[in-house]
Every structure is written in structure tokens, then in C-alpha cells.
Image (cartoon, rainbow, N blue to C red):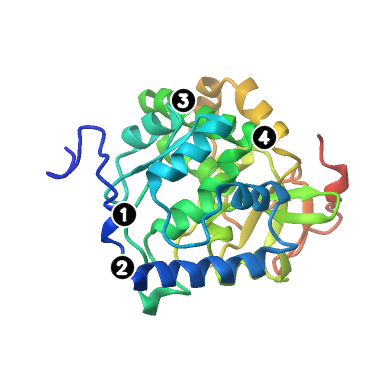
Amino acid sequence: MPPPDAAADWTIPQRWDAYTPQHHARWRFLYDRQLRLLSGRAVPEFLEGVRLLDMGEGVPDFARLSERLAKRTGWHVVAVPGLVPEDVFFHHLAHRRFPAGTFLRGPHELDYLEAPDVFHDVFGHVPLLTHPVFADYLQAYGQGGLRSIRFGALDKLARLYWYTVEFGLIATPEGLRIYGAGILSSAGESRYALESPIPRRLAFDLERVMRTPYRIDSFQDLYFVIASFDDLLERTLRTDFAPLYARLEALPDLSVTDLLPTDCIIEAGRTGAASGHPTCSPALLPN
């Protein structure tokens, strides 16, 4: 059941007028800091989305933001009271509505936040929804999520979202770049994801991703690298998830330190590569 002040689909009024000058100043600080950090680190499509949406003055008004976004890809941003049930989340995505929380982190939480806030949800996620292919991927994910409920495989599908939408990296001619919102909205992980020698970076493989649990309480030990948004969408659309879920049910989960013979290692990280295991260049990823 939704909270008393929410509609049946868990949406609530944003109440943009309730944001104070301090809220808007805090947004501007976070926004300006991240844009400085993301120059040369974020995928260009994200930076172009930031430019198109023009969100630098303060906490965005979801209604005005949705007007700009809908003209590009038909998506809207809707306010919700924090995390929502999986079926509600999938339903919104399947209908091109991105659910975003309305609270903004406090002055003592600028560098670390346990729960996603409006800066994570809007700055991290929404700019890439101006990109038609990524916008289609997120809708396809929502549609697949609705279908997955009857298979009891939500934990497996959540891993796909985590390692792509939240913490994905992409290969570009200039090198690896960030497209995951969990990284894009984090000052520390924006540096760590690309520059730290600690994490392993593997080429994206759908089944591998869905066998790999993730952790939410620290920077990631493993990132998956896609070749392009077109490739990510194509792999998602051409996969019959019913037999995949059945196969995953019979396979053990993999830890972030495990290495399969089929893994394509882009950067071995602290864990390293097994003796004789081949590595691969981002330039050689299928596209």
C-alpha cells in the first residue's frame, strides 16, 4: 500500500516551492562540483544531456524538467516518497516515467549518502534519458522487470540495473567513461571508478552480470564495461529471459573476485588475472 499522501502509483506532489534558498545553494554546490569532476570522465552523451536540461540554478522543478525531457524522448520525471516496490518501479519505467525522490541530502552528507536523494535521482539519472537509445534501454528494462516478477528472479534482474544504470562504464575512442548514475552523482566514485588500481573492470556479459551480487556500502570492486548503448539495448532486446532465468537458477552466484575463463578482462585491478588468462582492449569490444 502506498503512504497516505501518495497516489495509487506511489507518486506524490514534488512541492518545489518548499525548497529553501539553502536547498538550492546546496544543489548548485553539488552540481558545480560534479561537472568539474566529470569533464573527461563522463560519457559525452551524459554531459550533452546536462547541457540540454539546464539544471544548474537549483533543485529542478519536475514539471518544467519533464517538459524539456518529453520533447526529446517522451520521458517524464515523477516524484515519489523514496524507494518504491519493484512492480511500481518497473511500471513507471515501462511507461517512460522516472521515479525520483524529493529530499536533498544535508550539509553533513555531501560526500556520502546511504539512500538516494533528488541529486542522485535527477542529476545522476535524468540527463541520459535525453539520449534516445539509452531512453529505450531503460524502458525495455522496466518492461522486462514486469515480466520477471512471475519468474521469481528479481534479485538477478536487479544486478543488471546495478551494473549498468547505476554503476556502468562504457568504452569510447578516448578510453573508459562513466555512464552509471551511482558514479556520476558521487564525487569520490567519479575518480575511483576510472582511476583507482583496485577494482577489476570486465567486458559486459549479460549472464555474468546477473550471476554477480553487488554491495551497496562501499565503492565497487568490480565494474562492467559496455561497448555502446546500441549494443546494450540490442543484447537486452534479443535475449529470451525465461530460459536465462532457469539457467541462472541452476548456477551458483559469483563473487566479485571470481574469474571465469570466458571473462574479458579490460583492467585486472587488485585481484589480478589468473595465470595465462587473456586480457582485452576496450577497442576490441564487440560493437
The numbered disc on residue 139 is: none
Alpha-carbon span between mark 2 and mark 4: 40 Å
Amino acid tagged 4: Leu
Query: What residue does disc 4 label?
Result: 232
Q: Residues within 10 Å of mark 4 (few under 14, many from 20)?
A: some
Q: Earlier in the sequence, mark 3 or mark 2?
A: 2
Work out whether 96 lies above or below 266: above
Q: Residues within 10 Å of mark 1 (few under 14, many from 20)?
A: few
Query: What residue does disc 3 label?
Result: 143
What residue appears at the point 50 percent right and 25 percent down from the top-left corner?
246
Alpha-carbon span between mark 3 and mark 1: 30 Å
The numbered disc on residue 16 is: 1
Q: Nearer the viewer, mark 2 or mark 4?
A: 2
Residue 62 picture location, percent across and down = 39, 46
Query: What residue does disc 2 label?
Result: 20
Work out whether 35 lies above or below 235: below
Q: Is residue 41 visible?
A: yes
Q: Secondary structure at mark 1?
A: helix
Work out whether 132 lies above or below 187: above
Of all residues shown, which one is farthest toward the bottom?
Answer: 108
Amino acid tagged 1: Trp
